Image: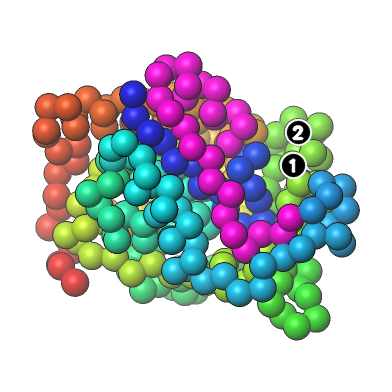
């Protein structure tokens, strides 16, 4: 039985893992769903009434997830969707002894010191890639929101219509200090841990070109390819759960016999 910590991305919440929790429990694992600070709270049908934490940075996000990880029985598998990839990367860097493996679901597996905008600029993608062009920004510039119609078209376009509409309505305002973040990691800590990258070829906000560039710049992850949009939790939950449970099972088995899951590569140097 392995603890699996599920971390949502920007504007979302723990509900994005609703289709994953049951299957993980069914095969004997213990899922833990994180609700990150920095995302609005309030009436699901009225974003205007949400209360938003004003200042949340990467340190605060890592402390929040790290406190959960520290309290678990043994090393956990961390799963980060989208921007939460930065968060799970940093948690793994700071406490690698508490992390059995890391999964990125269409996630930000970024090079150390690089944010997503810089990565996209490096491969010639526009500055307003994906959902960025549709964001609504608060007058003070500190908070962004995703219009429901944009969410359906960009995030959830390949999900069943009812699920896509419901998910779009559940998105919340996001504090920008909790979104525009970059990891700092080293070869001897984060990079040495087993990793799985679940790439989504039809992603309209983290384009597949960006996902594959991250894989090139942060090598060593096993890759599973899904022909889905940005949120396979909604559009292909069975395929995503199969990838997750397969990785978690293998990590758990390798831990029991004290053998590394992945070889260390020589393409990077210690920081």
Q: Residue at x 70, y 34 (%)?
A: 159
Taking the view exactly as shown, the residue that stands out farthest to the top is: 26
Residue located beneath label 1 in the image:
167
In the image, taking residue 270 as reference, residue 200 lies left or right, namely right
* x, y percent for residue 133: 71, 68
236 is higher (above) or lower (below) than 65 = above
Dot 2 falls on a residue whose secondary structure is helix
* x, y percent for residue 126: 59, 71
On residue 104, the disc is: none
Stretch of the chain drawn in magenta = 17-41
Dot 1 falls on a residue whose secondary structure is helix
Measured in 3D between alpha carbons, the distance from the residue under mark 2 to the one under mark 1, in whole angstroms, is 6 Å
Residue located beneath label 2 in the image:
163
Taking the view exactly as shown, the residue that stands out farthest to the bottom is: 140
Of residues 266 and 250, the one drawn nearer to the viewer in this rendering: 250
Q: Do the residues labelled 2 and 1 touch (CB within 8 Å)?
A: yes
Of residues 232 and 158, the one drawn nearer to the viewer in this rendering: 232
Q: Which residue is drawn at 15% across and 52% down?
A: 265
Q: Which residue is drawn at 57% across and 55% down?
A: 36
Asked whether residue 139 is drawn in magenta, I would say no
């Amino acid at each position: 039985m392995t603890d699996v910590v599920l971390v949502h991305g920007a504007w979302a919440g723990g509900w994005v893992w609703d289709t994953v929790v049951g299957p993980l429990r069914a095969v004997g694992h213990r899922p833990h769903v994180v609700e990150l600070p920095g995302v609005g709270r309030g009436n699901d049908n009225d974003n205007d009434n949400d209360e938003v934490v004003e200042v949340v940075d990467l340190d605060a996000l890592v402390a929040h997830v790290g406190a959960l990880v520290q309290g678990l029985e043994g090393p956990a598998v961390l799963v980060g969707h989208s921007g939460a990839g930065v968060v799970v990367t940093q948690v793994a860097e700071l406490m690698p002894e508490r992390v059995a493996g890391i999964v990125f679901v269409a996630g930000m597996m970024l090079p150390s010191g690089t944010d997503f905008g810089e990565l996209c600029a490096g491969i010639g993608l526009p500055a307003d890639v994906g959902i960025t062009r549709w964001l609504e920004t608060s007058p003070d510039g500190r908070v962004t929101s995703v219009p429901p119609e944009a969410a359906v078209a960009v995030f959830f376009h390949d999900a069943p219509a009812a699920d896509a509409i419901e998910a779009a309505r559940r998105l919340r305002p996001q504090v920008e200090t909790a979104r525009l973040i970059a990891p700092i990691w080293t070869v001897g800590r984060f990079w040495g841990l087993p990793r799985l990258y679940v790439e989504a070829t039809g992603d309209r906000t983290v384009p597949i070109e960006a996902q594959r560039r991250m894989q090139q710049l942060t090598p060593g992850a096993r890759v599973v390819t899904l022909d889905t949009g940005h949120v396979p939790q909604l559009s292909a939950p069975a395929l995503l759960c199969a990838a997750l449970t397969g990785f978690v099972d293998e990590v758990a088995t390798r831990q029991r016999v004290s053998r590394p899951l992945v070889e260390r590569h020589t393409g990077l140097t210690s920081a």
